[in-house]
Image (cartoon, rainbow, N blue to C red):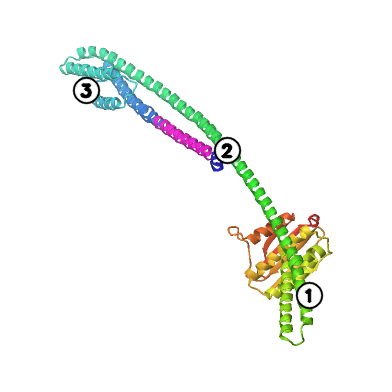
Amino acid sequence: MSKTVDQRRTPTRGLLLALVVILCSVLVYSFYIRVQIKHLRAVQTDLVDRNRRDSLQLLRIENNLNALALAMRDMLQGDEPYPLTAWESQFRRLRVDLDDALLKEDQLAAAHRTPEQRQYLATSVSDFWAEVDHVFAVANGGDEKAARALIPALQTHEAGLSSTVSRQLVENNRAEEEAAHQIESIYAGVERNVFVFLAATLAAIIVTGVLITLSNRQLFARLAHLSEQRSELAHKLIATQESTLQFVSRELHDEFGQILTAIGSLLGRAEKQAPAGSTWARDLHEVREMAQSTLDSVRSLSQALHPVVLDEAGVEHAIDWYLPMMERQNAITIHYGKSGSSQLVGSGAGIHIYRILQEALNNVVRHASVQEAWVRLQFEPGRLLLEVEDHGKGFQPDPSRRGIGVVAMRERAELLGGNIKWLPAPGGGTLVRLAVPKERLNA
């Protein structure tokens, strides 16, 4: 049940939804931009560029019509000593160029121009050339007077054509202005939507960030609660362990020690009453020595579980008693040094300092592969400093593989309100350093 509740409280769904919204917004806006750019390109290509090329052809047509108008004016004035038929080649050349311009203009005609409008210009030009052919036919027949009489009608027709071309040029200019306004509106719309999209994306990012922040706060609060529970449990376990060890040590020392002492006394009295040199006397002596050996072992075990000297004389004397025993049991040389003025250390803090020293020296024996270690106890003005150093292979706690001993050392240091560090020793190996504030030594 709790697992289901935790899964519901996790912000994974909300974060995924926010991510999907952001991705969809990006995709939609990308599609929108693509459509707008495509439309803008079509406007620029199909309208503006095409309209400009069409206007160039209309200007070409207008130039040809102006050239025809000038030629017809000269033909009417008669200042040149040439017959009308002499102008036929010039008209033919202008006709070729005008027809080519009309053909290209028809291909580039603006989309807003109707087929009737496009057909009207072609028909008007065709009628104009028919009248021109008729004028030159009359002139070729020898009646130049009659041919000249037909020219004013040609001029009127040409003026109409010029007016039509001028109107189309004006329409092209107006269409180009409209296209420019349309392009400007597209740019303005895209720019406006860019800000809208950025605002929406920023809002989505802010919402996602808020969700992540809230999620992190929940996770950190949960981790802090779990860490507090773990620390409290570890403290209770350490306290239970120490009380159990102290109880077992007291029972061994008081109960079993007294029993073994009584057995030894009884065996001693029995040995004195036995005949000297008899087998019975020798057996009683051997049994009494075994009882004494067992009593020594029980006392050593009692001291190892919880040294009485720690409660009676303090942690300094407990360390003085423990280090020689550690040397004898493990064939290791321990260089011990103290500095500073001794301070009163309560039994509560003293047992944790003593256990940390025990575990540090056990790690030297198990991991360092050396026969020497250095222990330093320093009483500084504001703290107590305990250092255990070796010059062996070195031992650094692995966060992924934390042993019980290392965890217990950290927890005990936390109980003391201090800190413990594993540092590289100056000469190689490991330096374990425990620092305890002075105000916590009487705990």
Quadrant of the frame with the N terminus: top right
Residue 7 pos. (x, y %): 54, 41
Say which amino acid is labelled 1: Ser
Q: Residues within 10 Å of mark 1 (few under 14, many from 20)?
A: some
Relative to 16, residue 255 above or below: below
Circle 3 residue: 88
Which structural element holds mark 1? Answer: helix
Question: Which mark sits nearer the N-terminus, 3 or 2?
Answer: 3
In the image, is 21 to the left or to the right of 105? right
Seen from this angle, which residue lies furthest left? 141
Nearer to us in this view, 240 or 77: 240
Residue corresponding to mark 1: 265
Q: CA distance from mark 3 to mark 2?
A: 88 Å
Percent coordinates x, y for residue 95 in the rendering:
24, 24
In the rendered image, residue 23 lying in the magenta stretch gets the answer: yes
The structure residue drawn at horizontal position 75% and vertical position 63%, both measured from the top left corner, is: 250
Ranked by sequence position, the earlier of labels 3 and 1 is 3
